[in-house]
Image (cartoon, rainbow, N blue to C red):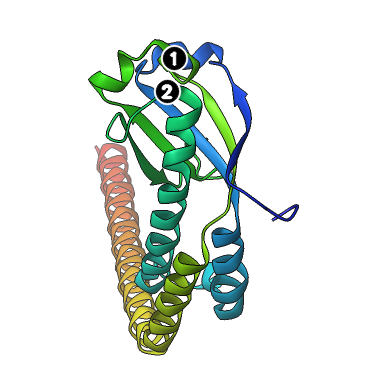
Amino acid sequence: MKTEITCTKITTNHGPDSDDWKKSPTRFTVSRESNAIALIESEFAGKHGIYDLPYHSTCWDAVVRASTAAEAAAMEPVLCAEFGLAPGDFTLKFSAKAGCPCGCSPGYIGMLTPAGYSRPSSDKLSRHHLWMDVLVGDGDIANIRAVMAKQAARLPAERIRGEAKVAAEKAVREAQKAKEVEEQAAWEKRRLEREEEYKQMDLRASLNSASL
């Protein structure tokens, strides 16, 4: 988190880029800075080395779900007030690829419902990219901490299972690779044997022709 977040607000509303005109007019995206993401990054992901795990962590998934649910709840009333929308006029769904297909810009994909799209101010949201500061309330922060504590307790067992699965998958890949190398070597041996047979056949034919 770059600066202290004191309230939930829209900091930038960027209009459609050239490629955005190919997308649905009911779609918009939200990138955010939030006290919730700062919390889970420092006190769960960083503490437990989540980004260094060799497997996909469902414990981390649960923590992210708790955080993003709280963020969405904080963002919705601000979006309604800013764009003259009513609850139910749009949906927000967290996506790791909201801002970029490679996954470098996680955020929220918003979709206007037919009622939301019919609002006069929807053109200020349609195909736009928003940047927001998001302040998650103390109650939701306490809930996120509770989820983190529960998932931290599950993490050691998950780590054992996950690393065992990764090791088993690696063993299968190595066995398959060894089999392919063996098959290639056998094929090369047969090729050389056939080549030698043809040479011997040619040699015998040449000797027979010379004796005539």
Q: Name the residue under label 1.
A: 121
Amino acid type indicated by mark 2: Gly
Q: In which quarter of the image is residue 155?
A: bottom left
Whole-percent x and y of residue 96?
45, 47
Judge from the rendering whether residue 163 lies leftward or rightward of residue 202; answer left or right. right
N-terminal label among 2 and 1: 2
State the mark number for residue 84: 2
Q: What element carries label 1?
A: helix
Residue in the picture at 49% in, 43% down? 107
Amino acid type indicated by mark 1: Ser
Which residue is the extreme one toward the right? 3
Whole-percent x and y of residue 206?
31, 40
Whole-percent x and y of residue 74?
46, 49
Residue in the picture at 48% in, 76% down? 145
Q: Do the residues labelled 2 and 1 touch (CB within 8 Å)?
A: yes
Image quadrant in which the C terminus is located: top left
